[in-house]
Image: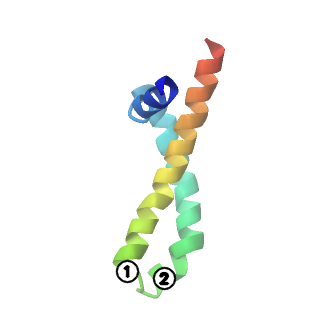
């Protein structure tokens, strides 16, 4: 439980945030283009697709923070 609490706190920690936002912007944009690019260009984005598109950016952010958090935890 302690590890999960630490990870959740790391999600908003400025130490991890800057790098994670960069990763989320790059990886999320690539994934967005792959998964939703056609729907966007054809003007077929539904509410469900927009929710999915937001998650497309959240997942790389969370994975990046997790990697940084684990790496820093192992260095201690």
Disc 1 target residue: 46
Give the camera-side residue of 58 and 15.
58
Disc 2 target residue: 39
> Which residue occupies 51% across, 74% down?
36
Q: Would residue 56 be visible to someone looking at this image?
A: yes
Q: Is residue 47 left or right of residue 53?
A: left
Assign a secondary structure to mark 1: loop
Above or below residue 70? Residue 46 is: below
Assign a secondary structure to mark 2: helix
What crowding class fits label 1: few (fewer than 14 Cα within 10 Å), some (14-19), or many (20 or more)? few
What crowding class fits label 2: few (fewer than 14 Cα within 10 Å), some (14-19), or many (20 or more)? few
Q: Position of residue 76 (x, y in %)?
A: 61, 11
Q: Would residue 22 be visible to someone looking at this image?
A: no
Residue 12, picture quadrant = top left
Q: Position of residue 65 (x, y in %)?
A: 52, 36
Q: Are marks 1 and 2 in contact (CB under 8 Å)?
A: yes
Q: Position of residue 20 (x, y in %)?
A: 51, 40
Q: Position of residue 21 (x, y in %)?
A: 47, 43
Give the camera-side residue of 4 and 21.
4
Along the polypeptide, which appears first: circle 1 or circle 2? 2
**Disc 1 and disc 2: Cα gap in Å?**
9 Å
> Which residue occupies 43% across, 34% down?
8
Q: Nearer the viewer, mark 1 or mark 2?
A: 1
């Amino acid at each position: 439980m302690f590890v999960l609490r630490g990870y959740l706190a790391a999600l908003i920690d400025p130490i991890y945030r800057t790098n994670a936002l960069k990763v989320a912007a790059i990886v999320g944009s690539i994934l967005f283009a792959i998964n939703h690019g056609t729907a966007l260009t054809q003007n077929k984005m539904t509410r469900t697709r927009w929710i999915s598109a937001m998650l497309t950016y959240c997942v790389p952010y969370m994975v990046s923070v997790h990697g940084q958090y684990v790496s820093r935890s192992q260095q201690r």
